[in-house]
Amino acid sequence: MAFSVTTAALAAMMALTSAPDLPAIASEAPVVFVQASGDCSAAAAAAVRETGGKLLSARPVGGNKCEIIVLVPGKGKDRPERRKVTKPM
């Protein structure tokens, strides 16, 4: 009985709650997903700062090193370059 009452209350709350308005994306820039793990945040920040690119991923690799993938803007109308950087943690 308690389960059905709780389920009914939850369903009623969900029905009455409106979803927040999401902003429209007006830019043509690609959506970039960031995947960072371990203690690679400082190394990833340094790689982004040095290359002037956008962080795509950062992960710890053997020893105290991080493998960082950065998307570096192309020159003029050239496509962006995917660059792999290895840095100490």
Image (cartoon, rainbow, N blue to C red):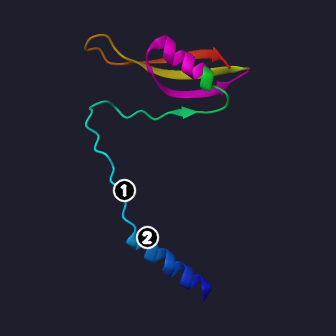
The N terminus, quarter of image: bottom right
Mark number for residue 76?
A: none
* Residue 7 % position (x, y): 53, 79
Amino acid on which the number 1 mark rests in the picture? Pro
What residue is rendered at 50% in x and 11% in y?
50
What residue is rendered at 49% in x and 81% in y?
8
* Residue 38 % position (x, y): 67, 31
What residue is rendered at 50% in x and 74% in y?
10
Q: Residues within 10 Å of mark 1 (few under 14, many from 20)?
A: few
The residue to which callout 2 is attached is: 14
The residue to which callout 1 is attached is: 20
> In the depicted view, which residue is nearer to us: 26 or 33?
26
Q: Residues within 10 Å of mark 2 (few under 14, many from 20)?
A: few
Position above or below: 45 against 35: above
Left or right: 68 with respect to 26? right
Question: Does dot 2 land on a helix, a strand or a loop?
Answer: helix
Position above or below: 21 against 18: above
Q: Is residue 70 magenta?
A: no
Amino acid on which the number 2 mark rests in the picture? Met
The residues tagged by marks 2 and 1 sit, at their Cα atoms, a distance apart of 13 Å
Q: Earlier in the sequence, mark 2 or mark 1?
A: 2
Position above or below: 8 against 18: below
* Residue 80 % position (x, y): 36, 19
Q: Is residue 49 magenta?
A: yes
Please indicate, yes or no, whether residue 64 appears anywhere in the rendered image: yes
Please indicate, yes or no, whether residue 84 appears anywhere in the rendered image: no
Q: Which residues are magenta?
A: 43-63
Question: Does dot 1 land on a helix, a strand or a loop?
Answer: loop
Position above or below: 69 against 78: below
What residue is rendered at 43% in x and 18% in y?
53
> In the depicted view, which residue is nearer to us: 89 or 69?
89
